[in-house]
Structures are given as structure tokens and as C-alpha cells.
Image (spheres, rainbow, N blue to C red):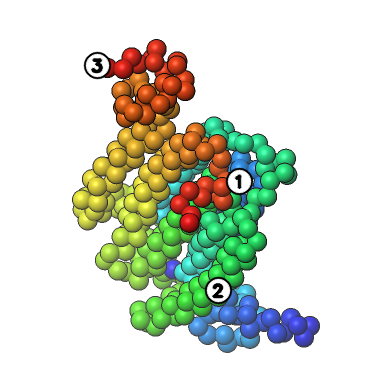
């Protein structure tokens, strides 16, 4: 119980609201049942970090490409969430976020096509898809 | 922008499934399993787009990513699959030192990003200075068609508005994107050609062609060296 209490500030930090009138539990419950912009941002951040971890740790170059797609999706989630937030504040340029998400998707598709073409060419020449064996440019 | 009621429930369901599917994408041993988990993660993110009121982006996400890019990924996996990793013989992660360094880096990123997200959101609220009641947010957020008889569902005009602003504010980037896609098509076709295809298109360096003919006499029959 003591340990739970010591974790409570962390959870309250994750689910904090501007005013916590009815204690921490009530604030957390209200935050969990009314997800707002910051929850979208946190989900996007977690997806981004998972993608970065995948890019940095995996050996299979195709899985690295998939992690890049995950990163781009996290960015799109942020764009769309901010677009929705600006719509609710009545901003004029609220749809710019959605437009940018469309362009991010276009660039991701082009990147996937080119990257997978490079993977195929690499596999023809090197017979491997492990990135730690492709070390021609290492000194 | 505050979701409530069933929207909040679905938000948490899809958010958790997106994150777990993302984690499994990174941690799965078989690349095909990774691709399938990535598909479920992308579909969950598309559902989050719908919850954020961006139906057009959600549709584009499913059509382009799940219908196009992931099929491409699966084809390439089948083309280059070395088959060793799903039998548990190969290590799927990189060297120990790099994994440790990247995990430390990601931990720092988690802390920084969580801090920045909450602080920045507070700053936004302070700047726009409004309490954001859920009903007020919905009323000003969806200036769309009239509610139906029960008043529960509305026809959104998100696609129409995105299309309009795409041509109104972003027509130049739109054209540039089409050129980019053309370049990507040509580039991927060029990159994925085999040596035989390059030789038959007469697109090889003559010296390289001679070397390759010395190794593989079949090539000479395919394309006699031009005088």
C-alpha cells in the first residue's frame, strides 16, 4: 500500500487534469473517462518510442522499415489530434493538421516503395538482410 | 476536445491495442508476424483517427497502408525470407551494447515526452483560456449536418472540408506529392531489376557486362555486345 502511494504521483502525473478537486482518484477517474488532447499525444509518443526502439535494436532490415512506419503513424496521430483540438478552439487553419497527415502518408508510401526496392537489390548482392552484416561503409 | 462516454471507452481500447500491437511488431521473431501486428496497430490508429474526427485520414490510412504498403512488405518478406529467424537460430536483436544504449535513450525519451505533453497541453489550455466542457467542444467541433431524429449521430462533412482545403491551401504540395510518387515508382522499378533485366535493357556498364559474361555465358546469348 505504501508502495502504491508512492506510485500515485506518477499516475496522477500521467492522467493529470488542471483541477483535482475531489482527490487524486476522482481526478484520475475523470481523466480516464474523458480523454483529451494530452492522451492522444501520450499515445502518439509511446508509439513513436516503440518505433525508435525497433529501429535501434532490430537486426532484420524489413522490421526496421516497419518500425519507421510506426514512427510516421505516431506523427500522424499527433497531427490529427492537434487538428481536432484546433477545431474545438475555432481556429481558422484547423484542417492543416489533417492535410499534413495526408502528405505524411504519401511520403511514407514512396519511402516504403524505394526502401523495399533497395532491400531487394541488397539481398541480391549481399545475400543477407541482417543490418549488422552490411558493414561495407564501416571503417 | 474531450471525448466522453462510449468514445472514451473505445479510445482506451484502441489506444491499448495500438500500443500492444506496436510492441509485438518490434518484438516478434518472425517478420511475417511483425507485419501482421503492424497491420493491427495501423488499424487501431485509424480507429483513433475516427475518434478524433478525421474520417478521411482514417480511410486513407486503411487504403494506403493496410491495402498497399503492407502488401508490399509481405511480398518483400516472401522474396527475401531467409527462414532462419523463425526457427530460433538467429539472434533477432542487435549487439548487447547497442540495445542497452537505445533502451536508455528510449527511457529518457519517455520521460521527456510525457513531461512535455502534459506541460504543453496545460500551456495550450492557458493560452486559449477556455474550460472546454465536452458539450461545448462537440457543438463547436462539428459544424456539420443536422442531427437525426434521435440526436445521437451526425453526418460529418470532414472529407468534404479536407478535400476543399487540400485544393485551396495545399495545391502546390499536392502536385509535388504526385511528382514524388512518380519518382518513387520509377526508382523502385529501377532498383529492383535483376542483372539479366539490366543487360537486356542495355543499361549496364560495358566493362561490367564483360565481367558478368565471363562469369555467366548465358548473358552473352541474351544480349550480344553491341559493336
Residues at marks 3 and 2, CA–CA distance in whole angstroms: 63 Å
Classify mark 2: residues with Cα within 10 Å, few (<14), some (14-19) or many (20+): few
User: Closer to the N terminus: mark 3 or mark 2?
Assistant: 2
Mark 2 and mark 1 in contact (Cβ < 8 Å)?
Answer: no
Q: Earlier in the sequence, mark 1 or mark 3?
A: 1
Q: What is the count of numbered marks? A: 3
Position of the N terminus of chain A by quadrant: bottom right
Disc 3 versus disc 2: nearer the observer: 3
In the image, is residue A119 above or below residue B220?
below
Image x and y of residue A135, in percent? 51, 50
Quadrant hosting residue B128: bottom left
Instruction: Name which of mark 1 and mark 2 comes first in the sequence.
Output: 1
- Determine the residue positioned at 49% across, 33% down: A124
Q: Residue B170 or A116: which is nearer the viewer?
A: A116
Could you say whether the residue bearing mark 1 is in a helix, strand or loop? helix
Side of B83 where B151 appears, left or right: left
Q: Chain of mark 3?
A: B
Give the residue number, with chain letter if any, for mark 1. B34
Q: Locate residue B108, reporting x and y percent.
A: 55, 74
The crowd level at tag 3 (other Cα within 10 Å; few <14, some 14-19, many 20+) is few
Residue topped by disc 3 = B227
Q: CA distance from mark 1 to mark 3?
A: 51 Å
- Contact between marks 3 and 2 (CB within 8 A): the answer is no
Q: Chain of mark 1?
A: B
Output the chain of dot 2.
B
Residue positioned 40% across, 46% down in the render: A111
Quadrant in which residue B52 is drawn: bottom left
Mark 1 and mark 3 in contact? Answer it, CB < 8 Å: no
Q: Nearer the viewer, mark 1 or mark 2?
A: 2
- Of residues A133 and A104, the one drawn nearer to the viewer in this rendering: A133
The residue beneath circle 2 is: B108
Q: Secondary structure at mark 2?
A: helix
Amino acid at each position: 500500500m505504501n508502495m502504491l502511494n508512492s506510485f500515485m504521483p506518477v499516475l496522477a502525473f500521467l492522467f493529470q487534469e488542471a483541477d483535482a478537486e475531489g482527490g487524486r482518484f476522482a481526478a484520475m477517474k475523470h481523466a480516464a473517462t474523458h480523454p483529451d488532447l494530452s492522451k492522444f499525444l501520450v499515445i502518439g509518443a509511446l508509439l513513436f518510442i516503440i518505433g525508435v526502439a525497433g529501429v535501434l535494436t532490430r537486426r532484420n532490415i524489413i522490421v526496421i522499415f516497419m518500425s519507421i512506419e510506426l514512427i510516421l503513424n505516431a506523427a500522424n496521430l499527433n497531427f490529427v489530434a492537434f487538428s481536432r483540438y484546433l477545431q474545438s478552439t475555432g481556429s481558422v487553419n484547423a484542417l492543416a493538421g489533417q492535410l499534413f497527415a495526408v502528405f505524411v502518408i504519401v511520403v511514407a508510401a514512396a519511402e516504403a516503395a524505394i526502401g523495399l526496392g533497395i532491400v531487394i537489390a541488397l539481398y541480391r548482392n549481399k545475400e543477407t538482410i541482417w543490418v549488422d552484416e552490411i558493414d561495407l561503409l564501416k571503417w | 476536445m474531450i471525448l466522453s462516454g462510449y468514445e472514451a471507452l473505445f479510445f482506451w481500447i484502441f489506444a491499448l491495442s495500438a500500443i500492444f500491437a506496436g510492441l509485438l511488431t518490434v518484438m516478434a521473431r518472425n517478420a511475417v508476424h511483425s507485419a501482421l501486428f503492424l497491420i493491427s496497430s495501423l488499424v487501431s490508429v485509424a480507429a483513433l483517427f475516427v475518434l478524433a474526427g478525421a474520417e478521411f485520414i482514417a480511410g486513407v490510412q486503411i487504403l494506403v497502408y493496410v491495402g498497399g504498403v503492407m502488401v508490399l512488405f509481405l511480398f518483400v518478406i516472401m522474396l527475401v525470407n531467409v527462414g532462419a529467424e523463425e526457427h530460433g537460430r538467429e539472434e533477432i536483436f542487435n549487439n548487447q551494447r547497442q540495445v542497452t544504449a537505445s533502451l536508455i535513450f528510449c527511457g529518457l525519451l519517455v520521460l521527456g515526452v510525457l513531461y512535455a505533453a502534459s506541460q504543453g497541453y496545460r500551456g495550450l489550455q492557458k493560452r486559449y483560456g477556455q474550460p472546454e466542457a465536452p458539450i461545448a467542444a462537440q457543438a463547436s467541433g462539428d459544424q456539420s449536418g443536422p442531427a437525426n431524429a434521435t440526436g445521437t449521430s451526425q453526418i460529418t462533412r470532414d472529407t468534404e472540408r479536407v478535400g476543399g482545403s487540400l485544393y485551396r491551401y495545399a495545391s502546390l504540395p499536392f502536385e509535388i506529392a504526385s511528382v514524388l510518387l512518380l519518382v518513387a515508382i520509377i526508382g523502385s522499378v529501377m532498383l529492383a531489376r535483376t542483372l539479366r533485366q539490366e543487360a537486356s535493357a542495355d543499361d549496364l556498364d560495358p566493362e561490367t557486362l564483360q565481367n558478368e559474361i565471363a562469369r555467366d555465358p548465358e548473358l552473352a546469348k541474351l544480349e550480344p555486345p553491341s559493336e
